Amino acid sequence: MKKIVLMVAGLALFTLASQAEGEGDVLTKAREGRRAEILKKFDKNGDGQLDETEKAAAREETRKKREEERLKKYDKNGDGKLDDAEKETMREDLKKRAEEGLKRREGKAEKKGPGKKAETPTVSPATPATPAAPQK
């Protein structure tokens, strides 16, 4: 059950990130600002990079915030955890958001016209990646 929830959440996050493509400088500035905030908060040794311990602390805080947001939105009975019905509602919402994002990306690809590359690259699972032949 957790794996399904995580996969759906990951797909939703990917969808949201894909929607942000094309927003250019605004998105880049927002990312840089967010990175600076994270460094300021979690870079305890002040080296300008997050070591494994600092990264773990940042991930844990992100996980807790995400869980709080999910509980706030989906915990209708207020018991502090998501029951099966609440989890199903969350999965349906995430699936709907993912589908909407896919439709938007497909629409953007169609607008590019024939012969143009789509923004989202496609990978065929039937074609395995092959290493380049060694150079002599």
Image (cartoon, rainbow, N blue to C red):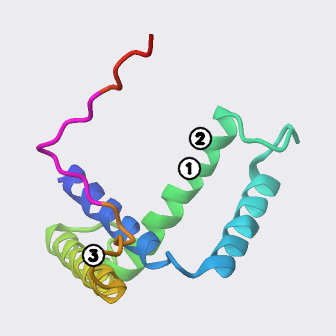
Task: Judge the density around disc 1: few (<14), some (14-19), many (≥20) Cα neighbours within 10 Å.
Answer: few
Q: Position of residue 92 (x, y in %)?
A: 18, 78
**In this picture, residue 54 sits left or right of residue 3:** right
Q: Earlier in the sequence, mark 3 or mark 1?
A: 1
Residue 104, placed above or below residue 50: below
Q: Does the image show residue 86?
A: yes
**Label 3 amino acid?**
Ala
**Label 2 amino acid?**
Ala
Task: Judge the density around disc 3: few (<14), some (14-19), many (≥20) Cα neighbours within 10 Å.
Answer: many
Identify the element where label 3 is drawn. helix
Which of the labelled discs sits on residue 98, or is there none?
Answer: 3
What stretch of residues is rendered in magenta? Answer: 122-130
**In this picture, residue 46 sits left or right of residue 130:** right
Residue at image position (75%, 69%) is 33
Which residue is outermost to the left?
126
Residue 129 lies in the magenta-colored region? yes
Q: Does the image show residue 77?
A: no
Which residue is identified by label 1? 59
Q: Position of residue 20 (x, y in %)?
A: 50, 77
Residue at mark 3 to residue at mark 1: CA–CA distance: 23 Å
Q: Position of residue 108 (x, y in %)?
A: 35, 85
Which residue is identified by label 2? 56
Label 2–label 1 contact, CB within 8 A: yes
Residue at image position (22%, 79%) is 99
